Image (cartoon, rainbow, N blue to C red):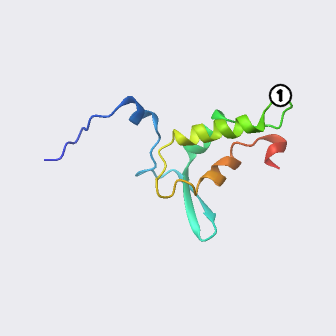
């Protein structure tokens, strides 16, 4: 008999999941398509934006971005593919040009 209500930890609930979600944006990288959920994009935009302000440290921005991405429930096998796509959404203003 399959358990329909498996025990989940608080960490399980804090990670967005792409499984079965239809609100995705598909970006082409070479011959591959990378699906990105719109709420994942908003999370990156709101969680670690970089504007190229004098007070901002680009190395700290990269560390913050990687820490945020590590918290996402991305497919292990294809984990690296969406990083360039997601990173562009963390750039604002002159940084995005």
Occupied quadrant, residue 70: top right
* Residue sitting at x 79%, y 31%: 56
* Residue sitting at x 51%, y 42%: 72
The foreground one among 1 and 61 is 61
The foreground one among 36 and 65 is 65
Occupied quadrant, residue 94: top right
The foreground one among 53 and 27 is 53
Image coords of residue 66 (percent x, y): 61, 41
Image coords of residue 63 (percent x, y): 66, 38
Label 1 Cα neighbours within 10 Å, binned few <14 / some 14-19 / many ≥20: few
Q: Which residue is mark 1?
A: 55
Image coords of residue 42 (percent x, y): 61, 40
* Residue sitting at x 35%, y 31%: 9
User: Which residue lies most toward the bottom here?
Assistant: 31
Q: Is residue 34 above or below residue 45?
A: below
- 52 left or right of 71 in image: right
User: Which residue lies most toward the right here?
Assistant: 54
- 96 left or right of 73 in image: right
Occupied quadrant, residue 51: top right
- 76 left or right of 54 in image: left
* Badge count: 1
Image coords of residue 55 (percent x, y): 83, 28
- 25 left or right of 57 in image: left
For numbered disc 1, what is the local secondary structure? loop
User: Which residue lies most toward the left here?
Assistant: 1
């Amino acid at each position: 008999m399959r358990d329909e209500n498996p025990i989940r930890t608080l960490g399980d609930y804090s990670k967005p999941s792409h499984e079965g979600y239809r609100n995705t944006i598909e970006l082409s990288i070479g011959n591959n398509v990378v699906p990105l959920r719109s709420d994942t994009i908003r999370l990156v935009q709101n969680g670690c934006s970089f504007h190229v302000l004098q007070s901002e440290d680009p190395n700290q921005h990269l560390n913050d971005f990687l820490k945020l991405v590590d918290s996402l429930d991305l497919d292990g096998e294809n984990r690296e593919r969406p990083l360039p796509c997601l990173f562009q959404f963390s750039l604002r203003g002159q940084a995005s040009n």
